């Protein structure tokens, strides 16, 4: 699936366009990511290749602020590892996903071999954040958040700056929707972490 790239089709490598029409294996996906590292790619649990366009400057600025805040807390807390939007996780359901920001418990990270840490590690992040861009369909992101939770995520935030809403996901709980919050807390999974949303609303 080529998402929201109608006007950019002429720039997409022909192989990527061709592969969006058939099932792609995880091994093929790894090759594609290495060969087309300028493109952001994901793979669904059923082998559907997703080609995503680059983000706008505004979305990139928001994502940079989001990751910086999480990374600063991670450095102080030292109980886990923070990742930006370039990290790809091999989820238990066979999907290959790249959240906009994520965090993994230190013991889970340390249990991986060096080769696994240098590849698409077979783990699901304990905490994930998806930041909606103008080209993102909300329903797709909602489904993606549900997939993270079903695969072992303990806390998830879907941040929609266009509606100024945050969807908070926790296991065995209804999704909570916060309207125009100035901040959102990561307690108890991320003790003391509070994401300042005021810059993300700009």
Image: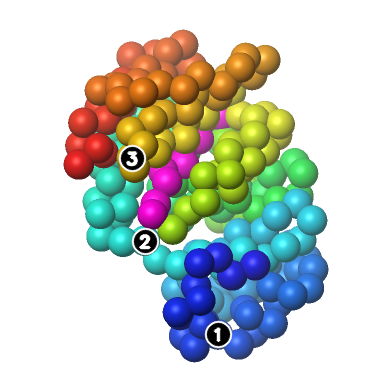
- Magenta stretch, residue numbers: 126-134
| Residue 180 horizontal/vertical position (percent) | 30, 25
Corner quadrant of residue 196: top left
In space, the residues marked 2 and 3 are separated at their CA atoms by 14 Å
Q: Which residue is mark 2?
A: 55
Q: Is residue 186 visible?
A: yes
Residue 128 magenta-highlighted? yes
Write the residue at 77% across / 44% down: 93
Please, which colouring scheme is shown?
Answer: rainbow
Give the answer, above or below, for where 7 lies relative to 95. below
Asked if the residue under mark 1 is in contact with the one under mark 3, i.e. CB atoms within 8 Å, the reply is: no
Evaluate if marks 2 and 3 touch, with contact meaning CB atoms under 8 Å apart. no
Instruction: Reply above or below: 130 against 180.
Output: below
**CA gap, disc 2 to disc 1?**
18 Å
Q: Which residue is mark 3?
A: 161
Q: Is residue 190 above or below residue 114?
A: above
Name the residue located 44 percent from the left edge and 51 percent from the top edge. Answer: 85
Q: Is residue 79 left or right of residue 88?
A: left
Q: Residue at x 61, y 17 (%)?
A: 174
Where 146 sits versus 63, above or below?
above
> Element type at marker 2?
loop
Q: Nearer the viewer, mark 2 or mark 3?
A: 3
Q: Which residue is mark 1?
A: 13
Residue 145 numbered tag: none
**Residue 36: image x %, image y %?**
53, 76
Please name whichever residue, 37 or 169, is drawn nearer the observer in this view of the structure.
169
Q: Residues within 10 Å of mark 2 (few under 14, many from 20)?
A: few
Query: Disc 3 versus disc 1: distance between alpha carbons?
Result: 31 Å
Q: Quadrant of the C terminus?
A: top left
């Amino acid at each position: 699936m080529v998402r929201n790239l109608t006007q950019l089709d002429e720039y997409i490598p022909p192989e990527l366009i061709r592969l969006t029409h058939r099932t792609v294996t995880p091994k093929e996906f790894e090759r594609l990511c290495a060969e087309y590292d300028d493109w952001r790619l994901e793979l669904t649990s059923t082998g559907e290749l997703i080609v995503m366009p680059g983000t706008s400057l505004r979305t990139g600025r928001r994502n940079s602020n989001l990751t910086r805040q999480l990374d600063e807390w991670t450095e102080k807390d030292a109980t886990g590892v923070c990742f930006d939007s370039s990290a790809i996780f091999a989820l238990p359901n066979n999907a290959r996903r790249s959240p906009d920001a994520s965090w993994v418990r230190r013991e889970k990270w340390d249990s991986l071999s060096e080769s696994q840490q240098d590849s698409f590690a077979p783990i699901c992040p304990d905490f994930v954040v998806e930041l909606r861009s103008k080209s993102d369909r909300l329903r797709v992101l909602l489904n993606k958040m549900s997939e993270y939770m079903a695969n072992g995520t303990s806390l998830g935030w879907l941040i929609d700056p266009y509606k100024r809403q945050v969807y908070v996901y926790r296991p065995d709980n209804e999704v909570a929707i916060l309207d125009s919050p100035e901040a959102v807390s990561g307690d108890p999974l991320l003790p003391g972490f509070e994401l300042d949303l005021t810059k993300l609303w700009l």
